[in-house]
């Protein structure tokens, strides 16, 4: 057990060192922005439809996860997702502490309602426990679903598994499943109990949000596919794959003793 945990830590450290910094930064930023924007609902003139502003950037998170899953595998992509959530929670703590510090937000100089503006912005950036809880649970669950469904669908393509057709199929299907789960879980935990959404609104939010985000990601999927090809060509993460292989062989050796 101790050796297994040590191997896990070793692999995780190597993984974090192997993921290209720009992709890692974009992924973390999208997770943070998605959770912050989830505080704002969209005004839509349809009683049965409700959406929040998190859909603006949530597709970025799923695009990053699809690229990471294709290149590093579902376990690695999920581990990075957990790290992103941990960093997001740390940033939320910083914003919460900042909301407790006496001071004046810049919007005061535009509108002059100091107490109202400060209280509103402190509440928004300080966050509420149920929004943070709901978004965290929803993202972790959807990340697991997205990453492993992406990997599973990819196993179907025996011929030309690295072609665009295979990449598009595994990306679109896993994103649809993952996005639906993410939207529905968040809506049921937060919007239904605290914002007064009906079950119908929760379901329509999950479906329409999934469609909107899937369309945007589909538009950018050629970029994701190109990134995967560049990473494969440049042997990105070679040290991580070597570490995983060494740990696997070490485990087999101990199992045969």
Image (spheres, helix red, strand yellow):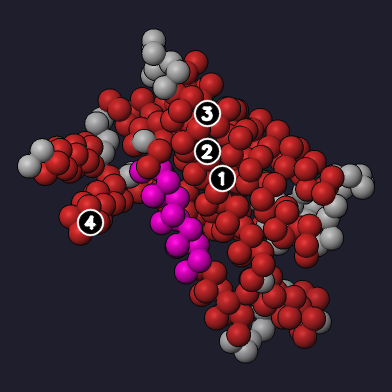
Disc on res. 142: 1
**Is residue 255 positioned above or below 108 on the image?**
above
Q: Position of residue 142 (x, y in %)?
A: 56, 45
Q: What number is the disc on residue 171?
A: 3
Q: Secondary structure at mark 4?
A: loop
x 48%, y 24%: residue: 153
Disc ID at residue 146: 2
Q: CA distance from mark 3 to mark 1?
A: 14 Å
**Residue 180 occupies which quadrant of the picture?**
top right
Residues at discs 4 and 1 in contact (Cβ within 8 Å):
no
- Near mark 1 (Cα within 10 A), the count class, few <14, some 14-19 or many ≥20, is many
List the residue tagged with mark 4. 1
The answer to whether residue 124 is magenta is no
Residue 119 location, x and y as percent? 73, 81
- Alpha carbons under labels 2 and 1: distance apart: 6 Å
Q: Closest to the observer: 178 or 104?
A: 178
Q: Secondary structure at mark 1?
A: helix
- Residue sticking out furthest to the top: 159
Residue 60 visible to an observer of this rendering: no
Question: What's the CA distance linking mark 4 and mark 2?
Answer: 28 Å
């Amino acid at each position: 057990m101790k050796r297994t945990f040590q191997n896990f830590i070793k692999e995780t450290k190597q993984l974090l060192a192997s993921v290209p910094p720009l992709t890692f930064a974009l992924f973390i930023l999208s997770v943070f922005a998605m959770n912050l924007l989830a505080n704002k609902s969209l005004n839509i003139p349809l009683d049965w439809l409700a959406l929040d502003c998190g859909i603006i950037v949530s597709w970025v998170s799923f695009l990053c996860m699809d690229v990471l899953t294709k290149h590093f595998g579902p376990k690695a992509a999920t581990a990075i997702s957990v790290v992103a959530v941990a960093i997001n929670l740390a940033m939320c703590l910083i914003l919460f502490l900042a909301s407790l510090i006496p001071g004046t937000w810049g919007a005061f100089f535009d509108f002059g309602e100091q107490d109202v503006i400060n209280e509103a912005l402190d509440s928004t950036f300080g966050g509420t426990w149920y929004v943070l809880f709901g978004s965290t649970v929803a993202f972790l669950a959807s990340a697991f679903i997205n990453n492993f469904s992406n990997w599973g669908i990819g196993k179907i393509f025996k011929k030309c598994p690295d072609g665009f057709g295979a990449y598009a199929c595994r990306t679109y299907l896993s994103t649809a499943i993952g996005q639906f789960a993410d939207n529905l879980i968040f809506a049921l935990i937060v919007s239904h109990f605290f914002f007064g959404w009906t079950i119908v609104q929760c379901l329509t939010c999950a479906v329409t949000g999934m469609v909107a985000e899937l369309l945007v990601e589909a538009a950018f999927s050629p970029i994701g596919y190109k990134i995967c090809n560049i990473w494969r060509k440049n042997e990105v993460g070679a040290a991580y794959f070597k570490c995983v292989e060494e740990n696997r062989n070490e485990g087999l050796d101990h199992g045969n003793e």
